[in-house]
Amino acid sequence: MKKEPKKKIQIIAAAESLFQKFGIKKVTVEELCQEAGASKMTFYKYFPNKIELVKYMWKQLIDDSMEKMDELDQRDIPFTEKVKVLLKMKEEATSQMGTEYIRDYLEMVPELLSFYNQIFGQVMMKFMDMIHRAQEKGEVRRSIRPEFFLAVVQQLMELAKNEQLASIYSDYTEFALEVNNFLYYGLMPAPDENKN
């Protein structure tokens, strides 16, 4: 794997830090450069604009997630255990994002929407493959159609944008986990994580 230049790494680290605190929309290229200790010329050497930086960061995140999903899918554990791991991954990712970043992510900066849909589609295809294998093993209901599942996921993502509903939770991570738990477990209690 090719090693990234030090300044590029610093710009990405600065973006992660500033986006967590202030969201994507409010952070300027100038602020990113100041936080990274880099000139604007250096920034533009690596990224044509802030949106391309965000795409780069999201692509890295998705590539990492896809790799982890592949590793998880190869493990010889029941699908319910795989779901627990996936929920933990989601919790960790969400807890690292600040409220404004999450808002910007959910409201989707228009320039990012088609890119997001593309990478989200890749993740969902990978997850649907996991579900198909679980269906073959009898671990997931065979009657669930992939199109229905994807439609439910999309509706739950719309629900995640509901500020009034989100406000009843202590933080957005708790709300996101509630949405994900409902997706996987419905009204039934989630399996006890302390059981082996």
Image (cartoon, rainbow, N blue to C red):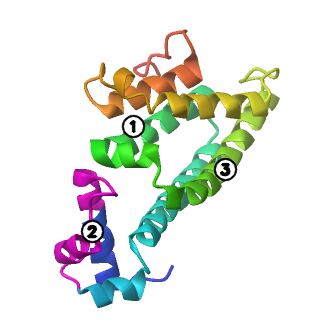
Q: Which residues are magenta?
A: 16-38
Q: Amino acid at mark 3?
A: Gly
Q: Amino acid at mark 2?
A: Thr
Q: Residue at x 47, y 34 (%)?
A: 87
Residue 19 image position (x, y, % from top left): 29, 57
Residue 155 sits in quarter: top right
Instruction: Determine crowd level at label 3: few under 14, some 14-19, many 20+ residues with C-alpha closer than 10 A.
Output: few
Sooner in the amino-acid sequence: mark 1 or mark 2? 2
In the drawing, what numbered circle is on residue 91?
A: 1
- Name the residue tied to disc 3: 121
Left or right of residue 56, residue 151 in this image: right
Q: Is residue 180 visible?
A: yes
- Name the residue tied to disc 2: 28
Q: Residue at x 25, y 71 (%)?
A: 32
On screen, residue 28 above or below 150:
below
Residue 195 image position (x, y, % from top left): 44, 18
